[in-house]
Image (cartoon, grey):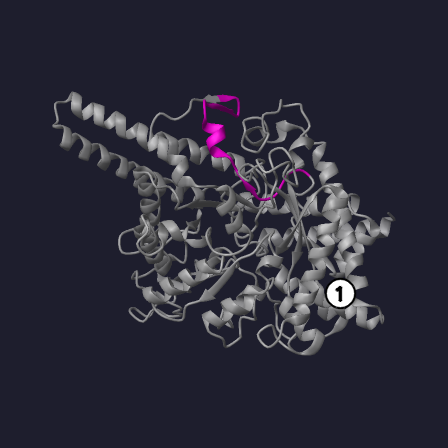
Amino acid sequence: MGAETLHRDLDEFYKRGQSILYLGDKENSNYDSALVSTKRSLLLNHVNERLYEEYFLTEEERRAAKEGYIYIHDKSARRETFNCCLFDVASVLQGGFSMSNIWYNEPGSLDTAFDVIGDLVLSAASQQYGGFTIPSVDLLLEPYAEKSYRKGLARYLELGVAAAKAESEALHRVEREFEQGFQGWEYKFNTVAGSKGDYPFITVTAGTGQGRFARMATRLMLKVRRLGQGKAGHKKPVLYPKLVFLYDEALHGKGGPLEELFEEGVKTSSKCMYPDWLSLSGEGYIAEMYQKYGCIISPMGCRAFLSPWYERGGMEPADAADRPVYVGRFNIGVVSLNLPMILAKAREEELEFFSVLDQYLELIRGIHQRTYEYLGEMRASIDPLAFCEGGLYGGHLSRDDKIAPLLRSATASFGITALEELEQLFHGKSLVEDGSFALCVMEHINEKISAFRKEDGHLYAIYGTPAENLCGLQIRQFRKRYGVIPKVSDREYVSNSFHCHVTSHITPVEKQDRERRFWELFNGGKIQYVKYPVDYNLEAIRVLIRRAMKMGFYEGVNLSLSYCEDCGHEELSMETCPKCGSQNLTKIDRMNGYLSYSRVYGDTRLNAAKMAEIRERVSM
């Protein structure tokens, strides 16, 4: 590197650093870049990104990323750790565990379990990037609720309380511990930043437990979220943990034994958007694995899903008795395609589109292969809770062991954005009007990735990218090389994954039907959501959720929530409080598969492109 080039690079780095220090950063809405700790983390991230680009990528990969044909997510972290996971909290707790050289006994009561799990989760989530999911939290907490109940019952009986009264008081005590525990998690997970300077993206799933304490856990988790946090008269829902309701028609359908939990979930979605809803009994891959094996494939973070990995056979079952395992597994990163740019390049150079597409798929394949190799050399000591204490599948290594064996069951994702813009560029039609070319492209990509998996022995997955900052970056990259093209690059943002354009004037039912075509082509990461332009219409929400569950969807309820910080008034989509005239509002909108503040303290944590998309939403 010449002196002139080095000086230019240092100058650019300095300018970026000054921008972070004095202006902040809105690439990720989980960051509060006003904080000193977050600014420090963002500066370090910028250094790590440059090191990754300079020393990990080939020249061809570097050029493809710089020009915008591919996008390598999380360059600041992917050299040293892994992405989204389904963390096996139950395995870590069982029998006790060591954290930061301190021994934790297994909790002996529900309130202690909440405290220990909260500390464990924050520590473990800080050692990775992406989503951190606690699967089936109702079943996780159930045995600790039983311990609290038995302790309380014994204490009341010793005091001479009548048996019936003792049981009632013991149950009431467990209920109170659930309420306080979930409240404690909400405070902790929304106020304590991780090592990267962000608030860890924690997800909990629940809803299938039929025992009395599992049912109690789900019901009170939903109640706490619905009531919100804050001072009296100014309560509003928090963002984390993301809640996902696990829906089984036999349990939650009309007349089912857990129908009342479904109704609690509908009420909570109508007030908070969360929970999102995952079908375990509809159509498709996720429901099929549940119905065949009883395995729940919880989403990792906002939308990532794991491919099957069998206990004895690995990628394929060894025999009819072999079972898949999901809890404790993880992803090692995503690289996304910019499909409209690839089509534009093929046309400009008079090349066959699919041959150009295949070149970029091969580039991503190479990046993933080296990521598996690089991460495999890491020692278990980088994340003891995951790799030594059983948080991840096979994670009982010694601190000096390499983690390569655990990577065999890890997925690596090929991300997809902008199918809407691809369809428009190909023949001037939207996904609502047509979608045939986008379907053809996705079928081709699925065939290629399937071949890569067999040849490489890696669990590659296809992921509907939740483009946050990327939604604007891909537009800028496209315009730089191919200009402004109506309905392709004339807005400030591209569409996420396979979703119909947010400006489409279609009903929620029509949106579900249009997007269903792509559902099984994105098994590595997907979510379907619709916007409810009605104020808390429970019947509309109830009907559309049940419809989505029959279709096998992972479904999100979209409302634009607004809260006046001055008088406490709340309603949908207000810009000025109609009660007191204040514009001091907190607004919560769906970013992609997750929620974020579109206004807080008079400002937004979202980038300009995403805010432009939110303003134009009709059918999202």
Residues 196 and 157: in front is 157
Q: Which residue is rendered at x = 66% and y = 36% of the image?
A: 407
Residues 208 and 168: in front is 208
Instruction: Looking at this view, name the residue that lies furthest to the right.
Output: 2
Q: Name the residue under label 1.
A: 342
Q: In this view, does 65 lie above or below 490?
A: above
| Magenta region, residue range | 80-102
Q: Which residue is rendered at x = 55% and y = 69% of the image?
A: 514
Q: Please tell me in which quadrant of the rendered image residue 175 appears.
A: top left
Residues 551 and 265: in front is 551
Q: Can residue 53 be seen in this view?
A: no
Residue type, label 1:
Ile
Position of 234 compared to 207: left or right? left
- Residue 603 location (% of width, % of height): 48, 61
Residues 210 and 244: in front is 210
Q: In this view, does 576 lie above or below 290?
A: below
- Residue 54 location (% of width, % of height): 78, 46
Position of 36 compared to 219: left or right? right
